[in-house]
Amino acid sequence: MKKFLFLLLLLVVGLHEGWAQTSPPFWADIVSFKKQDAIEALPSNPIVFVGSSSFTRWNNIKESFPGYPVVNRGFGGSTLVDVIRYAYDVILPYQPKQVIIYCGENDLASADSITAGETVRRFKTLYGMIRTNLPDTRISFVSIKPSPSRANIQGKVKEANQDIKRFLKKQKNTDFIDVYDAMLDKQGNMREELYVKDRLHMQPEGYAIWQKIIAPYLVK
């Protein structure tokens, strides 16, 4: 009997270690959000910001939009595939009146095989999930930004932005929030001073541009 219990214990430990090793990407971030939700009083029908690190690193996002019920659920490095995977964890439970999405840049940068068309298809999948479950929620997409470290994919970035804009124009209760051109200089060049040393993530000056452009789109 003792031998059986010992073998059973080894099996359980092995399964637990296997689960830990095969946890999906960003699961630790999702668990952290769930812990926050358990101890914080969240606003009802908030404006949920969701997507990748440009939102994750917007540390003063609530102060940037005073008077609005902002909930930031960006998790760094995420692709549209990841946001789709966790939509039932970081979007739908909050019953938001508006969802603001910044994602797709990491998709395009992840591999040469990830085309603008594939990225747009992923966005449409996410859009469909949100619209099906939250038919009255406003869905707003922030255009993919011009990151100097990713100058080599700007053709794909512009194509994806254009196609998502075209798609959203045909949908009800949506916005395409264009920040791309505002992050270029008068000659159409990327403004290096808007970014930190990695030339990917933004300085406060970059977020100031985003704040000014996004604010008029927020639902009262």
Image (cartoon, rainbow, N blue to C red):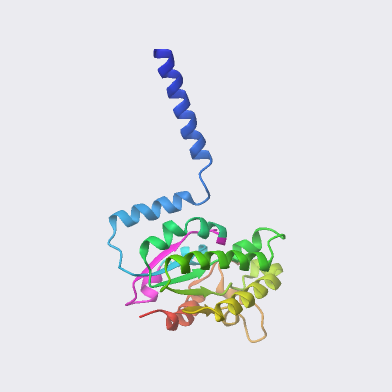
Position of residue 117 in the picture relative to residue 216 (left or right): right
Q: Nearer the viewer, residue 78 or 152?
A: 78
Q: Give the residue drawn at x 67%, y 85%.
A: 187
For the C terminus, which image quadrant? bottom left
In the image, residue 72 sits, relative to residue 64, either above or below, namely: above
Q: Give the residue drawn at x 46%, y 24%.
A: 10
Q: Nearer the viewer, residue 195 or 76?
A: 76
Position of residue 71 in the picture relative to residue 75 (left or right): left
Position of residue 139 in the picture relative to residue 194 (left or right): left
Residue reaching furthest to the bottom: 186
Position of residue 132 in the picture relative to residue 69 (left or right): right
Q: Is residue 57 visible?
A: no
Residue 77: name its quadrant. Answer: bottom right
Q: Give the residue drawn at x 56%, y 81%.
A: 169
Q: Give the residue drawn at x 43%, y 65%.
A: 133
What is the x, y in percent for residue 119?
A: 63, 65
Report if residue 79 lies within the magenta region.
yes
Q: Is residue 66 visible?
A: yes
In the image, residue 6 sits, relative to residue 111, either above or below, namely: above
Q: How many marks?
A: 0
Residue 121: name its quadrant. Answer: bottom right
What is the x, y in percent for residue 19?
A: 49, 38
For the N terminus, which image quadrant? top left
What is the x, y in percent for residue 42?
A: 30, 64
What is the x, y in percent for residue 91?
A: 42, 63
Report if residue 132 lies within the magenta region.
no
Q: Nearer the viewer, residue 130 or 38?
A: 130
Q: Nearer the viewer, residue 105 or 60?
A: 105
Magenta stretch? 60-80
